[in-house]
């Protein structure tokens, strides 16, 4: 079985793939709470509450904490999302310090970087996602009185469709270097769509452009057995989606190798090393050991 997904399927922030974006926002909200907060994302919690999914509201209110689970307890969730969020934050900040003034956040979900990062004057941030997700976040944050810290341009298009044309129609300048992020995205794309994504990124990128994503070397990381264990963990706090219905499996190109063969200089940052750099201890169980092989990837186009 490849996936429970269907061609042309769509979603908002409360269903299917969109609900996983709400789960990620709930983790950012938890990491932003308390006097010793690991993150500073004041918009994450109001977005989660606006979506209205009860399991995630209970998480941000501290009503759910599996202390016996080394991967899903409150502390572990906060540290995991902190490692991931800081990596992509630092990626964008580093790109702007190098003079990049154009950013594209692919499958932006409930990402709030356009509203909270210290973008230099003149920076344009494009967010690409499903129309329902884009509309929800735009309207919700406007209702909260939140203002972007860069010029934000929302591009409502499915990444399986002709998003490069939509991006260009939105004012994207192919002559300027760009910082691209594909955060938590690749498993939700069919293997051929992953290749097409990076082909399009490369074609749209001027020299000096950068891209950040994640890389898991084990092609069997999303086996039926592992996805079942992920689903069981989700179901413990009332999130009743089946992980096997969300991810595309099967052989796919290794993103690090693919980028190298397409002219990118690639750096990999193993998750275990980033945990240590952030002062965290990597959680140890079978599931986390699998994802311990995950690396965060930053690449620059020569």
Image (spheres, rainbow, N blue to C red):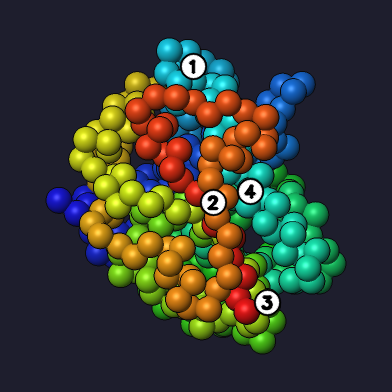
Question: Is disc 3 placed on a helix, strand or loop?
Answer: loop
Q: Residues within 10 Å of mark 1 (few under 14, many from 20)?
A: some
> Are discs 4 and 2 less than 8 Å apart at CB?
yes
> Are discs 4 and 1 less than 8 Å apart at CB?
no
Q: In this rendering, is residue 15 above or below 173?
A: above
First in sequence: mark 4 or mark 2?
A: 4
In the picture of the structure, the residue carrying the numbered disc 3 is 208
Question: Is disc 1 placed on a helix, strand or loop?
Answer: loop
**Residue 65: image tag:** 1
**Residue 87: image tag:** 4
The x and y percentages for residue 36 are 74, 23
Marks 3 and 4, how far apart in space? 19 Å
Q: Most extreme residue toward the right, as rendered?
A: 121
Nearer to us in this view, 257 or 190:
257
Nearer to us in this view, 66 or 208:
208
Marks 4 and 1, how far apart in space? 25 Å
Write down the quadrant of residue 31 in the picture.
top right
The x and y percentages for residue 250 are 23, 57
Q: Residues within 10 Å of mark 2 (few under 14, many from 20)?
A: many
Q: Most extreme residue toward the left, as rendered?
A: 1
Marks 1 and 2, how far apart in space? 27 Å
Q: Residues within 10 Å of mark 4 (few under 14, many from 20)?
A: some
- On the question of residue 282 being in view, the answer is yes
First in sequence: mark 3 or mark 1?
A: 1
Question: Is disc 4 placed on a helix, strand or loop?
Answer: helix
């Amino acid at each position: 079985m490849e996936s429970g997904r269907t061609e042309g399927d769509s979603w908002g922030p409360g269903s299917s793939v969109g609900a996983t974006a709400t789960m990620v926002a709930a983790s950012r909200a938890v990491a932003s709470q308390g006097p010793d907060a690991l993150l500073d994302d004041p918009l994450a919690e109001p977005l989660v509450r606006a979506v209205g999914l009860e399991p995630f509201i209970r998480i941000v209110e501290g009503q759910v904490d599996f202390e016996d689970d080394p991967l899903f307890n409150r502390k572990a969730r906060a540290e995991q999302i902190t490692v991931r969020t800081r990596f992509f934050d630092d990626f964008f900040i580093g790109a702007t310090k190098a003079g990049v003034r154009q950013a594209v956040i692919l499958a932006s979900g409930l990402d709030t970087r356009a509203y909270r990062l210290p973008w230099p004057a003149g920076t344009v941030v494009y967010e690409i996602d499903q129309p329902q997700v884009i509309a929800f976040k735009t309207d919700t944050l406007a209702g909260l009185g939140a203002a972007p810290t860069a010029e934000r341009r929302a591009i409502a298009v499915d990444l399986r469709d002709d998003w490069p044309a939509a991006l260009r129609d939105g004012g994207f300048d192919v002559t300027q270097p760009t910082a691209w992020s594909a955060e938590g995205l690749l498993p939700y794309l069919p293997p051929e769509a992953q290749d097409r994504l990076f082909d399009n990124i490369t074609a749209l990128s001027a020299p000096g452009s950068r891209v950040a994503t994640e890389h898991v070397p084990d092609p069997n990381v999303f086996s039926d057995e592992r996805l079942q264990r992920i689903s069981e963990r989700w179901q413990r706090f009332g999130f009743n989606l089946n992980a096997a219905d969300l991810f595309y499996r099967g052989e796919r190109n290794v993103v690090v190798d693919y980028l190298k063969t397409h002219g990118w200089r690639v750096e990999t940052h193993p998750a275990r090393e980033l945990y240590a750099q952030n002062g965290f201890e990597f959680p140890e169980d079978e599931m986390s050991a699998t994802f311990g092989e995950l690396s965060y990837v930053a690449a620059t186009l020569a």
